Image (cartoon, rainbow, N blue to C red):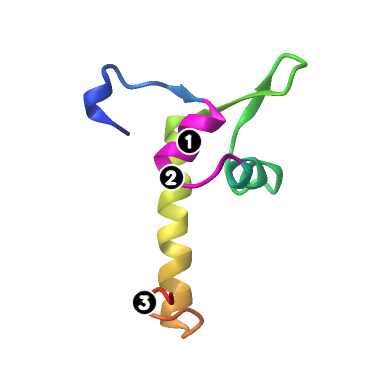
Amino acid sequence: MDSKAGPTLRFLTIEQVAEELNVGVPLVRSLLQVRELRGFQIGGRGIWRIGAADVEDYISQAYRRTATKIEAGELPDEEEP
């Protein structure tokens, strides 16, 4: 998380998670729906909060999944244009 932004937040919004992961809000919503990323709703208006620790867990799991796929030859070593 951004250390220059002041105190560390325990919970993040979908928009903050999207910014942290450098992805779009729809992708974060999708990750929540398929339960790859843990989060919870507050109230009945669909307001989501994601724990900062859950974002870090997701990143760690993504690194492990990616490494496994690379080792299995399922992903190229470089991005294709």
Judging from the image, what secondary structure is the residue with disc 3 in? loop
Residue in view at x 42 percent, y 78 percent: 70
Residue found at the far bottom of this picture: 73
**Is 69 in front, or is 17?**
17
1 with respect to 56 (left or right): left
Q: Are marks 1 and 2 in contact (CB under 8 Å)?
A: yes
Residue 63 percent across, percent down from the top left: 40, 60
Image position of 28 with respect to 74: above or below: above
Residue found at the far left of this picture: 4
The amino acid at mark 3 is: Glu
Q: Are marks 3 and 2 in contact (CB under 8 Å)?
A: no
| Disc nearer the start of the sequence (3/2) | 2
The amino acid at mark 2 is: Leu
Mark number, residue 78: 3
Mark number, residue 21: 2
Label 2 Cα crowd, 10 Å radius (few <14 / some 14-19 / many 20+) = few
User: How would you classify the magenta stretch by its main secondary structure?
Assistant: helix
Read off the magenta span.
13-25
Q: Which residue is mark 1?
A: 17
Residue 12 percent across, percent down from the top left: 48, 26
The amino acid at mark 1 is: Val
